[in-house]
Image (cartoon, rainbow, N blue to C red):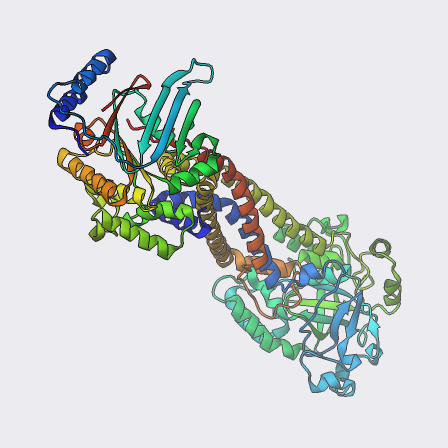
Amino acid sequence: MKLPIELQEQLRRVCERDYEQNVDALLADVRGALSHPSVSSPAPRTPSGDVVIDIRNVVKEHRLHKKSEPVKALRGVNLQVHAGEIVACIGPSGGGKSTLMHLIGGLDTPTSGEVQVHGVALNTMNDQQRSTYRNSTVGFVFQFFYLQPYLNVQQNVEIPLMFRGEEKTKRSEAARAAIEAVGLTDRIQHLPHQLSGGQMQRVAIARALVNQPKILLADEPTGNLDTATGNEIIQLLERINQEHNTTIVIVTHDTAVAQHAHRVVTLSDGDIVSHL
Amino acid sequence: MMKLNDAFAIALTKFKTRKLRNAFAAFTISLGIIIILVFLFGVAGVLDVGKKAFVDSLGDRHFALETFPTNKQIQSIEAGVVKMGFFEGVDSTTPSEEADSPEKYLEKYSADGVQVAYLHRLVAASTYGFGIQRDGTTDEFEKKLATVGWSAAVAEPMFVQDFVYADYHFDALVDGKIPVIIPKSATQADAYTVPFDVTQKELYEKFQVNAEKLIGQTFTVTLSESAGYSYGVFFGGAENVEPSEEAQTETILPTKTTIEVVVVGFAADGFYSSPLYDSYSLIFPNWALEQNTTIAALFAEPSEWRMVSEFASREERDRFVDRRHNTIDNDPVAGLGSYVQQIPSRFEMLEDLVRFFRSAGLGVGGFFLVVSSFFLMTTLGKIISDSQKEIGVFRAVGAQKRDVKKIYFAYAWLLVTGGFVIGVFIAVMLDGIASLKWGEDLFYQMMNAGVSASVSEPAFLFVHVVPLYIIAVYAALIVLGVLASAIPIRRASKIDPIQVLKDV
């Protein structure tokens, strides 16, 4: 499901502007985009799946130092993400996008509130359980790929399965399938430095998919790629979403990416300021 | 949870990408191992070459005279007595007609005065050696060896000393002559004087041929008072050879005397002597043999062997010896067999020496092992510091803390094991090189100190790779490695992926 063309154009303009110093302007523009008269009645914005990620009143505070005053990265955020949905998180730097993603990914726990995934509250899990959760339920895609330079494509993709204690043959089979899914079968023995940026991100996606996660979390997946390659990556994510009904949460500044989302969530100053 | 072999696989792959740095780190870790094993393997090598005779025999004064040679008289010496194998009709080493038949032996050697009194007896024997180094140059050596075969059997004073201290005494003269035995390896003494164009092996082999001819031969040996002093000074260690005042003023008489000796057999290979001054000072203060005469002697003392056997302790024996010492005058013949210096046991000195080298190796090596552990800690800390993003990604994709620990413990194990392998290799190499360079010297010094009673021919490789040492050192290293790795690895497991994966 895509946003209407006019709304996409307005959103592009919103995203391209620098709102670092002016959150009000951002909100005004987003609201303007939403109330644009040329926009026809909005299409259903989310697939009809069950709620997979349920974020309720989540507050996250950081302290730079032990004695320093806490800084609120998230201020009572509420968000539900449905199965098979692609949600793009946009907003100014420091708005809380990445923090939100870390909470969904089980890398961090909220100061208050609750993050539930498939009905299970992540903040009730201990470190070991959250590791298992990250290994089995979510897949991460990073802006800078973070492939291990000393491991070839297949070995990089196999890593999550290693941490699951999977047998080598099964691991190899699953890795090959994931690599095939991202179209890099011919590069399977290559080391990361022998690949282009787009190919490296594909490997990273294959690594994120190899465990067949229900949720894919992508932090600026196109941020380090040229436009054409970025588009390819987005199309790939879209295809994964369609083929496997994988829920995808993307943190991005890239409007092209946001355009492909079923829903765009704007975070600013630790709060969701709009749903598009 | 990650399997251990996968952790090792990742660690190994990562390890290979930093070959040079890891090799350097492993080498540094190996320093302690090198030092420890050089000492341990070296000492073990020394023991090995000596067939452990010297250390094993230190406690009970048991000499494994395995190859007492052709005259078959002395089969073994233990508990202060010399078993006369021939006379017991037993010889397990080199059976021969003579060995099995005392009658035939006597028939053959009676002319040389070997007395029946020796038969059927376990005797306590006191051996005394004295002699003088051949003064021959290398050129002269061949000639002397050929014409005066026995003179190649240079003095074996240490042999004598060791025997004295082990309470061995013969109980009779042989036909009024002093019975002497000649160590088969006596030519090793020439290490001091014939270093150039005649190898020790050649000397040894020649002596093997000539030595057989000496049995039963009698010799007149000239003792010279002045020679003792001069040779003592010459060898630079004559602290026990103080010339008498008369000798110093050249007023003493007589200046020379002669004694008759008969060669009754050979000592086992491996008994070797210190320089000569010990010899003559041992027996005759201020007296020495004339040049070109070299013997080791067994002096018969019929009245004393029983006494010796009755000594309750070493101290008692020493007191006895000391009393005898005090009765000696300057008459060498009258004093035969009755003078013993109060010097520390060579064996005890050797025992101390071995203990010292072992302790030194373990001490210095242990210190370096600890230093290596600190180096391992810092190396691993640096590697982990460089790998923070990697650890962050591992954690993000599902690694548990213990998985991270496994990987870096595997990495530490590779470093430690690499260091260990390098250490063992270098230690063996160093011992080997040291053996090649100093082994020959060491061998003779060992013989000099009465180390081995069982070495049949010179062996200069003082390396013995003892598996137990390897296992023990490796185990110690692993323990230290685990301790040293614990802190950085714990830190690694606590790395927060959010912090390290923050993109710029």
Residue A114: image quadrant is: top left
Q: Residue at x 46, y 18 (%)?
A: A66
Quarter containing the C terminus of chain A = top left
Q: How many marks?
A: 0
| B120 with respect to B478 (left or right) | right
Residue B105: image quadrant is: bottom right
Q: Residue at x 44, y 47 (%)?
A: B2
Q: Nearer the viewer, residue A227 or A41?
A: A41
Q: Nearer the viewer, residue B129 or A134?
A: A134
Farthest front residue in view: A41
Note whether B174 is above or below B476 in the view shown.
below
Q: Nearer the viewer, residue B9 or A230?
A: A230
Note whether B237 is above or below A117 in the view shown.
below
| A95 with respect to A257 (left or right) | right
> Do we see residue B157 in this rendering?
no
Q: Residue at x 72, y 64 (%)?
A: B129
| B106 with respect to B403 (left or right) | right
Quarter containing the N terminus of chain A = top left
Note whether B21 is above or below B37 in the view shown.
above
> Do we see residue A256 in this rendering?
yes
In percent of width and height, residue A182 lies at 22, 46
In percent of width and height, residue B219 lies at 70, 73
Note whether B230 is above or below A80 in the view shown.
below
In percent of width and height, residue B128 lies at 75, 64
